[in-house]
Image: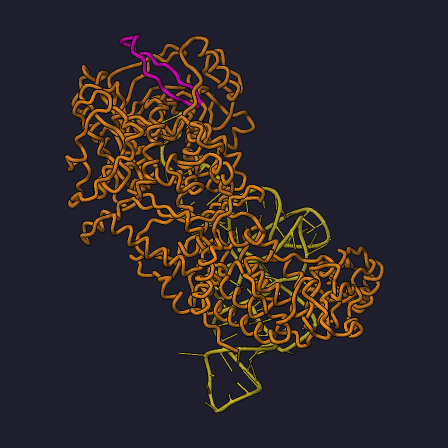
Amino acid sequence: MDKYNFSEIENKWQTRWDRDKRFETTTSTDKPKYYCLEMFPYPSGRIHMGHVRNYTIGDVIARYKMMHGVSVLHPMGWDAFGLPAENAAISKNVHPDEWTKSNIIYMKSQLKRMGFSYDWDRELATCNEDYYKWNQWLFLKFYEKGLAYKQEADVNWCDKCQTVLANEQVDGGCCWRCGTPAGTKKLSQWFFRITAYADRLLNDHSLLGNWPDKVLSMQKNWIGRSYGCEIDFRLASDENKIIKVFTTRADTIFGATYIVLAPQHSIVDELIKDAEKKEQIRQFVEQCKVRVALDEEVEKKGIFTGAFVVNPVNGEHVPVWIANYCLAEYGTGAIMAVPAHDQRDFEFSKKYGLPMRVVIQPELEQAQSSNYQLSTINYQLLNAYEEQGIMLNSGAFDGMDNVEAKEAITEWMEKQGIGRKKVNYRLRDWLVSRQRYWGTPIPMIYCESCGIVPVKEDELPVRLPKGLDISGGKNLASSPEFTNTKCPACGGDARRETDTMDTFVDSSWYFARYTSPHDDSQPVDINLADHFLPVDQYIGGIEHAILHLLYSRFFIKVMADIGLINHQEPFANLLTQGMVIKDGAKMSKSKGNVVDPDDIVNKYGADTVRIFILFAAPPEKDLEWSEQGVEGAWRFLNRVWRIVHQHAPRIRDMRVGADLCVCPDKQLAEFLQIRNSQFEIRDSRCVCPDKQLAVGRVGADLCVCPDKPSTPAARALRSFTHRTIKKATDDIEVFHFNTVIAACMELVNEIYQYNENDSAVLHEALRNLILLLSPFAPHICEELWQVLGNSTSILDEPWPTYLPEALHEDSVVIVIQINGKVRDKISVPTGSTEDVVKAEALKVVSDRLLGQEVRKVIIVPGKLINIVAGI
RNA sequence: GCGAGGAUGGCGGAGUUGGCAGACGCGCCAGACUUAGGAUCUGGUGGGGCAACCUGUGCGGGUUCGAGUCCCGCUCCUCGCACCA
């Protein structure tokens, strides 16, 4: 027997798959389709274990589906724009384009070495102009629809990356890419109006039943829809001046004892222009604008403006404060403070000695258990009372339940014209401008006389100039050749927008482009997109729970609205795989715990790596890297290799399928010495009515069928084989790959234990083992498939099915419990009646029951009997 | 604080509608084969006890003939959001 030479085998089959275009997508519409997609990588230089894990999971799913005869779309490409290319360009003195392309070449070779089943004809790279041209085209459509707009705003700024960041890209106050604390800058920038889709993004969660709850809840949280009320507070000094506040607690308005403005609120300047402590206030406002990127809770600070507003429900004059705990970017940037019923206001009031008024009190029975203490004359609050209760100090609403009062007060205010229902979102518009070179140029032109003018569609793409010097963070703005242009409207001198697009724009629709990657007349061919979308299974890291996955959902909805696509959601099912951990921490260069996939593939081969990664943990959990675990996977494949070779000589000539069991010139009489009466002789062929069952040996004197195992041991192995098929199929369907591999390991162990020679049963066991294992370790399985005497590719074989009748076992072990504790076991013939089981069980444990009364007997058929006994 | 998920041997992890806890693998122990074994094959391996047996799935209660699984109350861990009014 040859040694398991993984490198020879893997090379051989990768070449053959390539040569035979095994993974080319068929677009025939008569077959069901399956779109399996893994998040495409940034071409950083080399793939890492996280990629290997991500893509191995996807490959198993794709290959599994291929074995069901489904038309599988399984593409791969490159998220190729981005800052690292610029940094490399500066430090290594290569152009970002060159650097990126050479990285792609190497990483592609790494992916090929892993044996992944990609349709490389559909490969795309977002930095190619035949891709980013359509980014620009889509940008123009967004602009036409009013979904792309330019606005001056306080935007997040990363000093290190020298560019702005979207809200989603600020992680704990820091830049998502480099971790530098983000500041803010007032800049005029391009935004996508994702807020216009907030409701749809939220409501369509109902279409995402197979997304992890965690991701849905993160998105829900991020969108942050809340139903409330906008209320007008007029200045006491000038009733034409209104400060609007947003509240979800309209029921507490009679308890509003002051209002708070965010330091950035636009009315501040006007409000304090005559204030005594104007300078002091100005200083305070400036202080607040300094962002603190810290985890700690920020101390609440505020200052009185000297102004008063009128509480519209009771006419009270209440003071206007400016405080750091009121956010400018949420709601109206102003709140009404109800210290008795809001913990934040409570803390602030206590600090500054502001009055409180209780307007909701717990019902009596609740009062004792709450932290609300009420005496007859004075009340004392230890904390704000935020629970439900009964209204008081609220005029006509006294005595009402506060939940009803919320509704009633809102309606009343609407009638009075002093307030109205309002829905607010935490979600902000998506800032898409980037002050970087290596990205898609935004196709806009600024003209002195015409203003902002979009580039004409037929002028696309606006090409990135290649030979630009980008040292020192220089970008397109430093290139007069790029910047200077003519106005498409008036033909006069004009200049181009020099910002490029956020790279998340690129990745927001690439999955749609894969369905028609070479179409040069449109971003997507609607027929092909309709056929293949949505992605049936998307696989990637949870770090994109909000960013990429929210943006993509937004994009597909816009594309649907434009009429490019007929789908509302891009990804029907989502699997978020866990991280690859080593020594308790995520693999990273800075921690020095990185394992290079190349090293492991060189040492053990791709199949071993795949098996280890899939076996060590279920896909969604973190995976602890273990060299010993890799050894275990290696040993397992060697075990498979040996057992197949050991039995191959005897079963190699066997074939499944009746017409292969041909009777040559041999006498029929001899052929009829068949163990199995199911075989018939037809046209000198030995035919089994059930093709699945027939296993024949060409020209041999014996034609056998595993359906009639010769001995109990053979029968047991056959049953085990079919139970393994069942278990493996059930588990792979729900992506429990680790237990599928465990089941295959058990089958291997079982075959090793089997020491008789029923060739048909062995053939069936080995054949199915190889089929079941093939999506996981495809190269060795192809090879062993040949060793078993097949000349076809295993990819042409259907996924095996089990025969229910083959699951049958002659006897079954029944556990005997007494009072719920296992005391003995008996083996009874399968299908024994409860009476028989009960009698047998009572006999076996009779000693233990001496002097006890049997009170009850519970029987779980085929499993267990529990005897409840006592004195 | 809010939201989501989790806690099972020395380790990674299995455990269907409640029904033998610890599948499978790693590690460890022993045996066989061998000049040799860090190869391979076989057996053993939660803890305690010579044993019968006792005990055991983060903690405390409960439901049940029976709970890792269901219910109530906690603790701790991970992740996300975090003054969102």
Q: Chief secondary structure of the magenta span?
A: strand
Q: Magenta segment, which residues?
A: A228-248
- At 46% from the left and 34% from the top, the residue drawn is A526
Image coords of residue A466 (percent x, y) = 21, 43
Image coords of residue A838 (percent x, y) = 82, 61
Above or below — where is A231 with respect to A733?
Answer: above
Please tell me the colour of chain A: orange
Image coords of residue A862 (percent x, y) = 75, 59
**Image chain in yellow:** B
Q: Name the outermost residue toward the front.
A: A665
For this view, does A824 lie left or right of residue A355?
Answer: right
Residue A752 in magenta stretch: no
Image quadrant for the C terminus of chain A?
Answer: bottom right
Image coords of residue A783 (percent x, y) = 52, 67
- At 57% from the left and 54% from the top, the residue drawn is A67
Above or below — where is A65 with respect to A245?
Answer: below
